[in-house]
Image: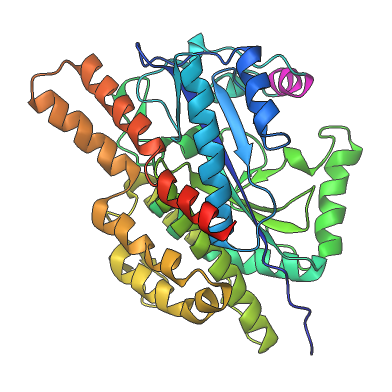
Amino acid sequence: MSYPEPSFTLGVEEEYLLVDCETLDLVAAPESLMADCAAELAGQVSPEFLQCQIEVGTQVCQTVAEAGRDLAHLRSVIARIAGNYGMAPLAVSCHPFADWHKQHFTDKERYRELERDLGGVARRMLICGMHVHVGIDDDETRIDLMAQFPYFLPHLLALSTSSPFWKGDDTGLNSYRLTVFDNLPRTGLPPRFSSWSEYRRSVQIIIDTGLIEDCTKIWWDLRPSDRFPTLESRICDVSPRLDDTLAIVALTQSIMHMLWRLRTRNQRWRIHDRFLVGENRWRAQRYGVSNGLIDFGKGTVEDFADLLEELIELVREDAIELGCWAEVQAVRRIVEDGTSADRQRSVYATAVAGGASTKEAHREVVRSLIAEFSTGLEAHRNAELVTG
């Protein structure tokens, strides 16, 4: 049987937090700041649920390199304009010491409706995520890959973890963001559907009741986009370093291509029970890359670095074809250096060991996140100048 080849285009969305450059506390974005951003980034920037958040999204990109150039531009503009207001953006999933009680909602009907619908659960949503859209044009192919891809979601989460602190406490988790997000309805690992029509019938029941107006209110870790012909991975924390973001984006795109390649050969990735994948999801949420995931074939917990090497080799052919082999191999650096959660804990421990108070140590963590936001942007901007 012949299958149409998907476009495998990319779109990346990142959510940022805004802090005051002096106090390093979260601060609401004034309307004029949002207007300045919109003037330079028309259609690629928007307010988020809380006034201290801002969201950006790339254009439709053909390659990871193109997405990198776009994200470097978006980050650069946001950082420059925020700086004009005495603010700085953080690409991180939780602020180390902010109190969600003190934050204010963006005055927008969509967000007022969320607050009314979700109550206290919504008020705790002081979290940011990173979403990766991969162009899978055919509906049936999209739903078929959606059934197979969840096996890899814990791997991607582990690499992205950036939220160990909450309200000044070390939670013991590498991704506390996911703990907060999982309190929402219609979250977590996606259910399995046998066809596109079954998926549409199921979600239409909820839409027809008036409980949600469309599928954008479905927040699974992986979902078909309601606006684009894409499969959207939503499980990842935001990565402070752009190079880490692009490595995760490349791995996501390559896994999708690998699953499609198997499909063209009448092969499939084995679909494991959500209970088992959920256990790996928890391990990634708790430990990041430091304590291994379950190899379901062996029935043992294996070192994450070893599992990652197997995954890199598995998608080698696909990454080379997509032109992102270098970025895929860069995921090794995340394991070697530690995730953002690991680095944040290291900065905090070093500050305390040097005599800093708990409060000041947390502020050192924020300073490190401000610095990492712009790490690597120059190289990607230069690449844009060379190619453009």
Q: Position of residue 377 (x, y in %)?
A: 43, 44
Q: Which quarter shows the C terminus? A: bottom right
Quadrant where the N terminus sits is bottom right
Q: Does the magenta-highlighted stretch encompass residue 351? A: no
> Based on the displayed image, in which of its 4 quarters is residue 213 positioned?
top right
What residue is at 81 percent from the left and 34 percent from the top?
Answer: 212
Up/down of 65 relative to 96, above or below: below
Q: Where is residue 336, by image quadrant?
A: bottom left
* x, y percent for residue 173: 34, 39
Please report the residue visible at 47 percent of the width from the left and 35 percent of the height from the top. Answer: 177
What residue span does the magenta drawing correspond to?
109-117
- Pick the front one: 185 or 114: 114
Q: Is residue 113 magenta?
A: yes
Q: Nearer the viewer, residue 304 or 24?
A: 24
Return the x and y of residue 240 as percentages of the image width and height: 40, 40
Q: Nearer the viewer, residue 238 or 78?
A: 78
**In this image, 37 relative to 330: left or right?**
right
The picture quadrant where one finds residue 265 is: bottom right
Q: Is residue 379 visible?
A: yes
Give the color scheme: rainbow, by chain, secondary structure or one colour: rainbow
* Left or right of 150, for residue 35: right
Q: Is residue 255 above or below residue 337?
A: below
